[in-house]
């Protein structure tokens, strides 16, 4: 996972590269782990680490956006340049007033350590219980068990600077029989 400081550095750099009247940078991503099962067998137990940077640039009521997942200075500059070029080519959006302005609001953290500590073996054990029950009843189990460890940072040229980390656990299954089926989340 990225540190909060690294996320803030990337966001500040992104906004500083822009010549727009207003600029907004959102960096989001993290780690995602998936255990997939089909036909009463685990067929994948994988993980990935991925972050994206989305930029919006406004010139008056013209807005352009672009995104990138390479955080080198050159890649960020090129992405800002692309958002600027797109904004200049847009027609004015009569509904656009402004990007968000700073307000007093407490920062929230939705990161649950116990969820983050779920290992591939633990996910497989949870799924195995579903598979064993399905086999016992002569049914066919399919689905996914996903654990996400996510971070979101937002910074704009109007003074907004927010950060949040969170965890999400999701278990979805479809159980099939000869004459029936069931779905659970």
Image (cartoon, grey):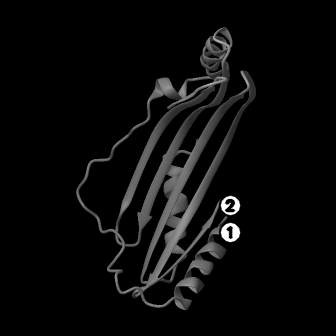
Residue 32, by quadrant, is top right
Q: Which residue is mark 2?
A: 70
**Residue 44 percent coordinates (x, y):** 75, 31
Count up the numbered dots.
2
Secondary structure under tag 2 reads loop
Disc 2, disc 1: CB below 8 Å? yes
**Residue 84 percent coordinates (x, y):** 55, 83
Viewer-proximal residue among 137 and 81: 137
Residue 106's place in the image compared with 128, above or below, is: below
Q: Residue at x 49, y 36 (%)?
A: 168
Of all residues shown, which one is farthest toward the top?
A: 136
Q: Residue at x 25, y 61 (%)?
A: 103
Secondary structure under tag 1 reads helix
Residue 164's place in the image compared with 182, above or below, is: below
Mark identifier at residue 75:
1
First in sequence, mark 2 or 1: give its number: 2
Say whether residue 103 is left or right of residue 169: left
Q: Residue at x 40, y 86 (%)?
A: 61
Could you tell me which quadrant the N terminus lies in?
top right
Density class for disc 2 (Cα within 10 Å; few <14, some 14-19, many ≥20) is few
């Amino acid at each position: 996972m990225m540190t909060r400081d690294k996320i803030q550095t990337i966001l500040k750099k992104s906004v500083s590269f822009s010549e727009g009247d207003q600029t907004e940078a959102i960096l989001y991503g993290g780690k995602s782990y998936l255990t997939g099962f089909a036909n009463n067998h685990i067929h994948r137990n994988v993980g990935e680490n991925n972050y994206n940077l989305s930029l919006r640039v406004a010139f008056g009521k013209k807005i352009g956006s672009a995104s990138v997942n390479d955080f080198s200075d050159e890649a960020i500059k090129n992405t800002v340049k692309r958002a600027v070029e797109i904004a200049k080519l847009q027609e004015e959006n009569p509904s656009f007033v402004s990007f968000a302005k700073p307000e007093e609001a407490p920062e929230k953290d939705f990161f649950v350590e116990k969820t983050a500590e779920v290992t591939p073996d633990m996910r497989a054990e949870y799924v195995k219980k579903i598979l064993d029950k399905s086999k016992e009843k002569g049914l066919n189990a399919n689905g996914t068990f996903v654990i996400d460890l996510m971070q979101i940072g937002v910074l704009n040229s109007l003074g907004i600077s927010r950060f949040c980390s969170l965890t999400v656990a999701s278990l979805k299954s479809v159980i099939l029989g000869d004459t029936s089926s069931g779905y659970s989340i």
